[in-house]
Amino acid sequence: MSSTPLKDHNRETRTFRVRAVIAFAIVLIALFGLIARFYFLQVMEHDRYSALSDKNRVQLQPVAPTRGLIYDRNGVLLADNQPSYSVTLLKEEVKDLDGTLQRLQELIPITDKQVERFRKRMKQRRRPFESVPLRFRLTEDEIARISVNYHRLPGVRIEADLIRYYPYGSSLVHALGYVGRINERELERVDETNYSATHYIGKLGIEKYYESILHGQVGFQKVETNARGRVMRVLERTDPVPGEDLILSLDLKLQQTTEKLLEGRRAAVVAIDPNDGGILALVSTPGYDPNNFVTGISSKDYGALRESDDLPLFNRALRGRYPPGSTVKPITALAAIDSGSVSPSFKVRDPGWYTLTKDGRRYRDWKRGGHGIVGLNLALAQSCDVWFYSAGHKMGVDPMSDYLGRFGFGSIESLDLPEATRGILPSREWKRNNRRAPWYPGDSLNLSIGQGFLLATPMQLATATAVIANRGRWVQPRMLKGAYQSDEEKGFAIGEMDYDFGKDKPQDVQLNHPEYWDLIIQGMVDVVHGPRGTARRSAQGAKYRFAGKTGTAQVVGIKQDEEYDAEKLAERLRDHALFVAFAPVEDPKIAVAVIVENGGGGSTTAAPIARKVMDAYLVGEEEVESTEFESLMGYDHD
């Protein structure tokens, strides 16, 4: 009996060999596949994955330039940059945006309005891996709460930023304007690359007009980041070029003094240096705090500003269009005598009214009983309407419109005030185009005393007054004085800045009879220094001689035989008070225009304000006792 072996070694050897070959083949196939994949990734797709890898590890980040500062003519800082901390999100690293926002709202106060604005900013992003701010001006406690929860908030960052700060708040808002969050419409107008890291842009005023100078040039840096996107180190950096620091012609001391004089009123004052057109003060009251607009004002606060009856958002100095009233009488008188319509010796008998035809409509004088026999000088000093009615009727609209245009009415001659408006300078053609009606003789009478269709801004009135002070030499109002330069002795110096405003200077006012300047200016001097001048009280105690002209602009019309009684009218229906002046007469250094809405007569309200503005600039009198201020007030209507 033969024995059966327990193992078949030959068979097992063959089986092992087959399995080994199969395993080896599988390994070879896998190795070939791995090598092929390596080749595909490392060679064929090298550029693509290298770029993706660098994007995760190395990022090119724009570096925002520091915005230029703004100073007044004496080197006082008017617009500063202050550090602020914001919470931002990087969309590429945020896996659950809604969940992240909800967790952040649990940690710090974030309103639904802020979330809504954040989502809008997310849609207008310009570059990948650019953080989007959610909330600004974090407190130290809020920063700490977010920092200890970083592990729960992938893509959330705390970033430091420099934001605009206006130390004098509402005092300068209508002169400087402000910056605010940049929006999509504004992004389309600027260089996208240069604004790639900029969150703010000039919205109004000087901040808007000189945006290209104040902004500077963007810089860039290559940074190495970790898996969470945190910057580990800076690999390469091109520093940004900061914006230029500007010096304005504004005098902060004068600005604040003027604002104090207008406190509690709806009013505007513009003061200009007649020598170079530099704007010394530009005040519109009431104002508002521009700091609230820098990072975004709440809907509630903005609604309160918009709905206020006093219109604090409205820049009266540049955009307020008012009938200039008698403040333009020096120009209409100049037009009448220089055009030859009447002679400088022309006189009228003023019974208190003027008619174009016998028994026709009576155009009343402000003085109900009239002024008697009136010539040019008394017509200006006493603001006699009848003299101007008569001269205006003889002259007609064409010379009046022509001469008013030469002084800047109906046009924008300021250089760097983007909000300025042109007002209305009526003419035959203007009325035909805008009112579909011919020009009537009564329209000329109204125009001669600054009423009717004529509308002017306080800036235009100050500009025209400066031209009169210069005896026809034109200076264009401007805010910019020069570039800021450091100086060891003064602390600052004014450097030259060659800026192309893109505007031609208006032609100087050339008279047919240059000697007539003396007649007009003397009439304005007698308004304040003459024994019968409408604003004679405003010159009491003055340490210099000045020339001025009162004005009163009607807000509502009154019937022909009805007497004006301010006490019977609602406050907002009372006349506007105006006054223009320049000083000193012999060497003008300041030209002023004042308007007080519903303030009554120019001599009683506006003239004392102008006097104190000139005092503050020329002799440094800033504080005025109430009794002294009252003593400056006149009693004549105009």
Image (cartoon, grey):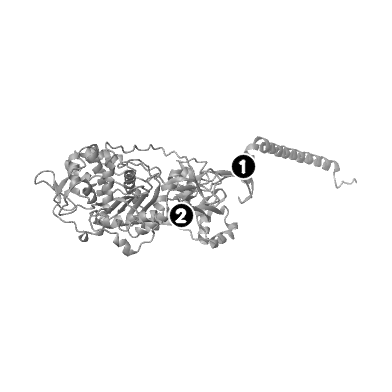
Picture coordinates of residue 605 (x, y %)? Answer: 28, 57
Task: Write down the quadrant of residue 635 in the picture.
Answer: bottom left
Secondary element under disc 2, as helix, strand or loop, is loop
Rendering coords of residue 625 (x, y %): 35, 64
Q: Residues within 10 Å of mark 1 (few under 14, many from 20)?
A: few
Residues at marks 2 and 1, CA–CA distance in whole angstroms: 44 Å
Residue 111 lies left or right of residue 160; in this view the side is left
Residue 179 x/y as whole percent: 45, 50
**Front residue of 131 and 519:** 519
Q: Is residue 129 above or below residue 506?
A: below
Residue 357 tag number: none
- Element type at mark 1: helix
Q: In the picture shown, does residue 621 fall above or below 121?
A: below
Mark seen at residue 52: 1
**Whether residue 285 is visible:** no
Point out the frontmost of discs 2 and 1: 2
In the image, 350 versus 439, the foreground residue is 350
Residue 396: tell me if it is visible: yes
Amino acid marked by disc 2: Tyr
> Quick one: which residue is furthest to the right in this view?
1
Q: Residue 139, percent across and down?
A: 52, 61
Q: On the picture, is 13 further left or further right than 337?
A: right
User: Which mark is drawn over residue 166?
Assistant: 2
| Whether residue 138 is situated above or below residue 450 in the rendered picture | below
Which class describes the residues within 10 Å of circle 2: few (<14), some (14-19), or many (20+)? Answer: many
Under mark 1, the amino acid is Leu
Q: Earlier in the sequence, mark 2 or mark 1?
A: 1
